Image (cartoon, rainbow, N blue to C red):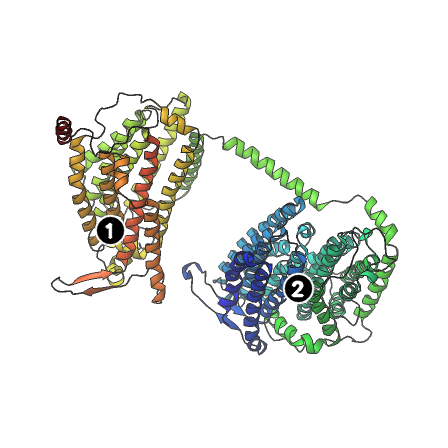
Amino acid sequence: MSLFLIVALPFLGSVLPALLIRAGRNSAYLSTAAVTLLALVGLLLNAPAVMRGETVTARLDWLPGLGLNANFFLDGLGLLFAGLILGIGLLIIIYARFYLSREDPMGQFYSYLLLFQGAMVGIVLSDNVLLLLIFWELTSLSSFLLIGYWRHLPEGRQGARMALAVTGAGGLAMIAGMLLLGHVAGSYDLTAILDQREAIQASPLYLPALVLILLGCFTKSAQFPFHFWLPHAMAAPTPVSAYLHSATMVKAGLFLMARMWPVLSGTEAWFYLVGTTGLLTMLIGAVIALFKDDLKALLAFSTVSHLGLITMLLGFGTKAAAIGAVFHIINHATFKAALFMTAGIVDHAAHTRDIKRLGGLRKLMPTTFTLATVAALSMAGIPPLNGFLSKEMMLEEAAHTVWADYGWLVPTLATLAALFSAAYSFRYVAHVFLGPVRDDYPTEPHDPGAGMWMPPALLTLLVVLIGLFPMAMASTLVETAAGAVTGGQVQQVHLKLWHGMTPALVMSIIAIAGGVVLLGAHGWLDRVWNAMPRPEAKEIFDALVGAATRASRAVTDTLHDGSMTRYGAILLAFVLALTGYAWFSGTLAAPTRRTMEIAIIPLLGWIGVILATALVVIFHRNRLVTLVLIGVVGLVVSLAFTYLSAPDLALTQISVEVVTVVLMLLALNFLPRETPLESSPMRRMRDAALSIAAGLGVGGLIYALMVRDFAFPTISDYHLANSYSGGGGTNVVNVILVDFRGYDTFGEITVLGIAAIVIFAVTRAVLNSPVRAYLLNRKPSEPQSGDAHPMIMVVATRMMMPVALMVATYIFLRGHNLPGGGFIAGLIAAIALVMQYMASGFSWAAERLRFPYSALIGSGVLVAAATGIGSWLAGKPFLTSAFGYFHFPPLEKFELATAMLFDLGVFLAVVGAVLLALESLARFAWRPGIASEFPMDINPAREVEETTAEEAR
């Protein structure tokens, strides 16, 4: 199965449970399980090739100019993590079906779960760091939805926000680090970066990139001091905790450290940053876990500790340590997911997770007790379970690691962490399941049905089998994955229970014995712990968030006080200061182009624009005069385009000016004639000074650019050379719009349609408010003409309409080779229709235009999109034009191009947007009695007919 399909399946399948929940909870559950199982089968089909040492790849050049390629690859490390994500994910899906209550929206839960699953699979299979970053942020967003799934719980909402804030901030840092890394390596493809070890470590950007990337990894994998978000994420349902915090989300940081191990490890910076952080996290997490009374909180801090263990091993930088890290990733996923699920079973059965309210469950819940005991003993590192094997490998590496010339420090702290790990594991069993049966449980505990105990039972079986038969069960996968981590083949891995009396075994015995002692002394140690003053990470986080909120609010209230003139002044002042610094601190080459002689007509046009602009400033309080002057400026600009041989721009400019003036006139009908005087003289002087400086600066910059050659070759030569051969048209401007930059045009018509729909929605909302009463009862401020629809205007516009539509058709058809195109044609057709509204009134014209304008917009966007998608069917990029010449007698030979269909979409969207905006604004003008059934108010012929009819009666 293609890697593309494996990654896409969870995303595509996330729609199914949301839809099928209407058919029942089992339908949503089975569809989710089927999608995950199918992706897992596809992964396993590629496993034999990976086990043989091959790398499975899938490549798609998406935006190669930016280095963003949709490339995926599957090696040993990717196989390990993808297998954990999909395999444990399948068990979690089964478990959740029986865990969630009927009040919980199961379809929503499974949709969120599949979105998260797809993002995680995308991370571990990505062969492009930019693509990996996209999936990385998707895990933060989808985990936010999962952690906050029980949004009726305040702690659930807070835990989701905290997780998103911490991991999101780390993700931003990692983005910067990955960009630096790609810059140094000269590529953003992971397989290319992994071959650049020497270049990366020799670069001065190595340390900044390392720190930034590790910030992303540490926040995602809850490493100290960012560990505090993980326990608060336990407010999520237990299936979420079991999935996110055993095999997936918190392992994303570990995966990335393992993935980048070949190029980033082996330096002192890597050792001290990664190794030390992992060691501290392992110890701090283990100590805190021992004193937590909430089952999931205990497991959460134990997860923090074990994540620190793996991080520490990766930080050591040796191949043996990397093998141990890979092996413990497998073991931790098995026993920790099983433990989370047994904790959920206890909570589900006893209705409490408080250890002090539990105990004695061994007799009431024997199946759960057996599963929890085996998994907890593995977490404690008791032979012959799998946790013992990887713990021994960790202690062996710690025993031979020297930190800053202190050979005793790392093994001592590692042993101490293992001791606390054994203690909280023993406590999980002893204080929850052992002891006498109590009579004050919130409800009577009992073992659940097979749907809840079978998933942890399968994981517990793996715990035992890997412990007893490690070579048969795990050695091949560990070797393959470790080879991918270290960047080469590793020697045959020897996984076995007995290595003789080694320092690691002695350290392990001390840890287990010390764990038993700590368990016996837990009562008075717990009292001492609770009496000790200690910093609370949550309080520190809340204080930091509160301080940041207050600071941002102070800045916002100072700078953003609702005054648009203030915003403009601040922006202009900043831009002027920045450009002034650039101008006076930089250098400017001598002019290389000779200026042209100025003719009298362009000079007069330029003076006219300056005068009209100045008059706009002077008379800006008079809205109507200002609109007329702006129209004059637009008209002169269109004439300038014509003079400078830019007819397409001239046609567009004049068409836009007409439509804009008409729509603005409609809007001005509901505003006072003059704007109120709001600015003080000093503020007006300030604004004038800033405006003059900005205008002179922009003018000077444009002049400096025009009299000098460009620093880089322009793209215009490419467009001129390829307009006909590549796009089939001689009108370069139109070919750019519908072919070379067709995607931009597609976005523009989409935005234009959205803007028109927003105008319609806002208008509808206003008319449904008390404002409607004001509009219906308002009195015109000026005397109204008795002839609202004059005959001469009706006749003129009626005669002009077919001519205008014919011109629009002509402009549309010739646009690919001569000035014109769909945008200009759409504006001309819209003007022809707008004139009918102006002459005969909105009501009369709307009755005769029976098509919905919003549908016109949608049709235009769909036609344009279909044209672009058609290119994919021919194996070409989106919106690649196809053209040819045809001869149909008696017509001459002519050209047909797919760009015409795209232009048709532009035409429809423009006409629909203009008419929808017109209709929306015209609704404000409607009042009872203004609509007429006739196209004109005064018609002599109608008067004669009425007189004749009166006489006949």
The residue depicted at 58 percent of the width and 49 percent of the height is 169
Q: Earlier in the sequence, mark 2 or mark 1?
A: 2
The residue depicted at 32 percent of the width and 34 percent of the height is 922
- In the displayed structure, does residue 393 sit left or right of residue 570? right
Amino acid of disc 2? Leu
Q: Closer to the camera, 273 or 490?
A: 490
| Marks 2 and 1 in Cβ contact (< 8 Å) | no
The residue carrying mark 1 is: 821
Residue 645 appears in the figure: no
Q: Quadrant of residue 345?
A: bottom right
Q: Quadrant of the C terminus?
A: top left
Q: Closer to the camera, 435 or 630?
A: 435
Residue 341 position, x and y percent, is 71, 60
Residue 591 appears in the figure: yes
Q: What is the C-alpha distance between the residues marked 2 and 1?
A: 61 Å
Residue 111 position, x and y percent, is 56, 57
Amino acid of disc 1? Gly
Q: Quadrant of residue 649?
A: top left
Q: Name the secondary structure under disc 2.
A: helix
The relative height of residue 577 versus residue 393 in the rendered view (above or below) is above
Graded by Cα atoms within 10 Å as few (under 14), some (14 to 19) or many (20 or more), the crowding at tag 2 reads many
The residue carrying mark 2 is: 314
The relative height of residue 640 versus residue 678 in the rendered view (above or below) is below
The residue depicted at 65 percent of the width and 73 percent of the height is 478
The relative height of residue 730 versus residue 528 in the rendered view (above or below) is below
The relative height of residue 343 versus residue 86 in the rendered view (above or below) is above
Q: Closer to the camera, 821 or 581?
A: 821
Graded by Cα atoms within 10 Å as few (under 14), some (14 to 19) or many (20 or more), the crowding at tag 1 reads many
Q: Quadrant of residue 950?
A: top left
